[in-house]
Image: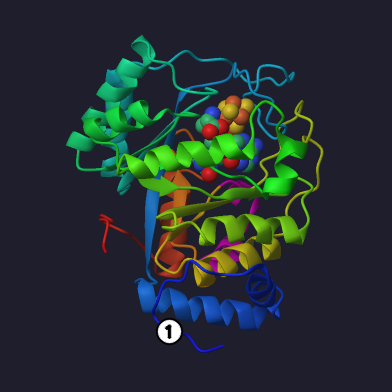
Amino acid sequence: MTIEKNIRTDWTLEEIKAIYHQPLLELVYQAATVHRLWHKAAEVQVCTLLSVKTGGCTEDCSYCGQAARYHTDIKVKALMSREEVIACAVRAKEAGSSRFCMAAAWREVRDNKDFERILEMVAGVNDLGLEVCCTLGMLTEQQAQRLQQAGLYAYNHNLDSSAGFYEEVITTRTYGDRLNTINHVRKAGITVCSGGILGLGETHEDRMGMLLTLATMVKHPESVPVNALARVAGTPLGDFPKVDAWDMVRMIATARILMPAAMVRLSAGRAEMKEEEQAWCFMAGANSIFTSESETLLVTPNPGFIEDKKMFETLGLKPLVKKKITE
Ligand code: SAM
Ligand code: DTB
Ligand code: SF4
């Protein structure tokens, strides 16, 4: 494979299969080469994740501990105050984060007081000079525009898996609903963060199918989170097997080759990965992670600031100071 510095949006499934199924070390070498052409490989963006509204969600996503219908021991928490959230963002910035993502366990955004409060949070975090990201469920075009006007930099809305496999995982919304929200976000001029989850019972072809959808978008997502299923007791997938770290490496490497300019985020699953396994993911082109003060992602464990700082020192990585839209 010759490696040229250009972005392609015309990938075919056959090409993706050929990349994905290469011998692992060859794949990682290629991905690492692409990574170095487009990014400073020692820089990893640290994104602090905060659950601003937890649990009680009406959706039936079979992986999620926050869906009201499953009997998990997660405590429902109403929308946090603007002050609490801004204070958390200040501490995140001090600890080296350049991006701050606020997540809410909502099916969709409603035009009510809670949304007004979210808009204030977005403006407050933006004033700190952090990239502000939200993940709040489905959005209308108008809601996306209001978020953009408030200063939102990115919106996270995952495709999770392939179009074909989606209905095996979620029945309360469609893949088309997901794509519509992503289009609304794009149209409003907000950057797109969209990726998926490994370990839901999908095939390798489903993983490649999702990458095909992402890598053939008119514009690639600026950020692509790759999550390993964080198993939550009480959810339908609670007793599924742990995702193999090599599967994460293969997925990250393929995403890096297909979408060279994107930030590829090693997302859920780090709590169950050794430092060595995470190092392979960085070698394969991951250049961002989620961290959090509470040492949880949303409701599952995640390494905290201190543990991540130690890993960065060991691996010679440094937090990316500020990623601006280039292009
Ligand atoms: N409720 C909104 C939504 O679903 O779009 C926003 C928050 S939701 C928790 C954000 C994303 O987290 C989901 O789209 C899914 O990809 C990921 N996620 C949720 N639970 C997960 C789990 N147990 N393991 C891995 N990823 C998970
Ligand atoms: C994403 O792709 N991963 C994050 C973020 N976007 C919002 C969430 C992962 C959630 C993991 C399980 C949990 O703690 O609920
Ligand atoms: Fe609700 Fe989001 Fe969890 Fe699905 S992933 S149940 S929409 S919080």
Q: Nearer the viewer, residue 141 or 262?
A: 141
Q: Regarding ligand 3, which quadrant of the image does it lie in?
A: top right
Query: Which quadrant of the figure contains the C terminus?
Result: bottom left
Residue sitting at 71 percent across and 21 percent down? 72
Residue 88 falls in image quadrant:
top left
Depth order, front residue of 217/72? 217
Residue at the spot 31% in from the left edge and 17% down from the top edge: 117
Which secondary structure is most common in the magenta stretch? helix
Above or below, comparing residue 231 to residue 119 in the picture? below
Residue ID at (65%, 22%): 67
- Whether residue 277 is in magenta: the answer is yes
Amino acid type, residue under disc 1 in the picture: Glu
Query: Where does label 1 land, which residue?
Result: 4
State the image coordinates of residue 86 (x, y, percent, origin top left).
27, 27
Is residue 118 placed above or below 16 in the rendered structure? above
Of the pair 155 and 162, the residue shown nearer to us:
162
Please report the residue visible at 59 percent of the width from the left and 68 percent of the height from the top: 254
Give the magenta-colored segment's residue range. 268-282
Image x and y of residue 197, in percent:
64, 48
